[in-house]
Image: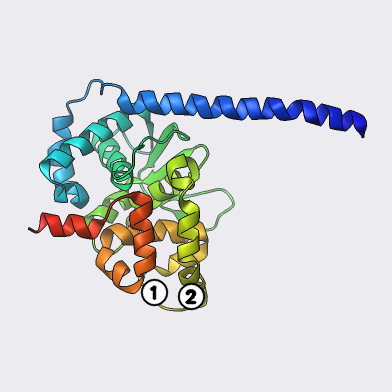
């Protein structure tokens, strides 16, 4: 027992040192990713594609559109896209990347430091061990997105069914320190609604939110961006929690764009 305790006590400082090194490494990598010059891309070329396909971007004033494109250019330089069952598609990279920038546009950090790869699949797919199709999922290997379903999510920007926002919400809550540290505030605010939906109660959130608290978070993010007024009217506390967590307010964006 004494030998075990001696070995254990010797390992603790090593584990702490490794954790500190990993944190430092990710911090330096994030800093370099978010400040590096954008390579080989004319960011102005993004404008028309985003204007026609991302309603959030279309609502932004001109100066914020410039900042959005700058962030997007750095994001695309920092992440690898792999296409499965379809040819390489630069437009897909830009639009999928724009979902990540939209989610984090109010935050200081916007790169996916825990992820190196986004896998783009042509359509829904089946995972081993499951008897249903997936349109997207996130694990430590990367972010997986069905391109067909992604496009559908942005074509109708009023139904709170947006695969891009859904999967990016998962990715950032799992891997991004800035969001994951605040995620507990969402869990506290959402718990009564989550329990209500699980019990069969009606809600502005899609019933899929009852699957788990992680799915409740992703569905709430979809609703926050696509049905903000409905969410605020029915769940004002939850809405304000998301405003505080993401540091942006879609209702204010809508009102400013309509002036």
Q: Position of residue 71 (x, y in %)?
A: 27, 34
Is residue 109 depicted above or below 55 in this figure? above
Q: Position of residue 119 (x, y in %)?
A: 41, 38
Is residue 88 depicted above or below 61 in this figure? above
Quadrant hosting residue 159: bottom left
Total numbered circles: 2
From where the camera sits, is residue 196 visible?
Answer: yes
Outermost residue toward the right?
A: 1
Dot 1 alpha-carbon crowd within 10 angstroms: few under 14, some 14 to 19, many 20 or more: some
Is residue 97 depicted above or below 232 in this figure? above
Q: Position of residue 28 (x, y in %)?
A: 44, 24
User: Which of the image's four quarters has the N terminus?
Assistant: top right
User: Which of the image's four quarters has the C terminus?
Assistant: bottom left
**Is there a contact, CB below 8 Å, between mark 2 and mark 1?**
yes
Q: Which residue is mark 2?
A: 196
Residue 213 placement, left or right of 56 = right
Q: Which residue is mark 1?
A: 203
Residue 236 placement, left or right of 190 = left
């Amino acid at each position: 027992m004494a030998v075990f305790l001696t070995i254990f006590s010797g390992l603790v400082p090593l584990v702490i040192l490794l954790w500190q090194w990993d944190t430092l490494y990710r911090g330096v990598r994030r800093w370099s990713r978010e400040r590096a010059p954008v390579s080989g891309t004319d960011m102005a070329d993004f404008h028309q594609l985003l204007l026609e396909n991302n309603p959030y971007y279309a609502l932004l004033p001109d100066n914020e559109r410039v900042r959005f494109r700058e962030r997007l250019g750095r994001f695309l330089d920092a992440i690898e896209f792999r296409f499965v069952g379809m040819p390489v598609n630069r437009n897909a990279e830009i639009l999928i990347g724009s979902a990540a920038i939209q989610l984090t546009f109010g935050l200081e950090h916007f790169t996916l430091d825990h992820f190196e790869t986004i896998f783009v699949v042509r359509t829904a797919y089946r995972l081993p061990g499951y008897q249903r199709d997936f349109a997207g999922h996130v694990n430590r290997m990367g972010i997986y997105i069905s391109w067909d379903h992604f496009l559908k999510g942005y074509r109708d920007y009023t139904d709170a069914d947006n695969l891009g926002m859904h999967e990016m919400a998962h990715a950032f809550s799992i891997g991004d320190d800035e969001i994951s540290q605040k995620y507990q505030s969402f869990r506290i605010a959402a718990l009564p609604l989550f329990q209500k939906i699980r019990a069969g109660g009606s809600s502005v959130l899609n019933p899929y939110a009852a699957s788990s608290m992680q799915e409740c978070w992703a569905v709430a993010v979809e609703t926050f961006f696509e049905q903000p007024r409905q969410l605020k009217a029915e769940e004002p506390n939850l809405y304000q929690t998301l405003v505080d967590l993401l540091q942006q307010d879609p209702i204010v964006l809508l009102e400013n764009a309509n002036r």
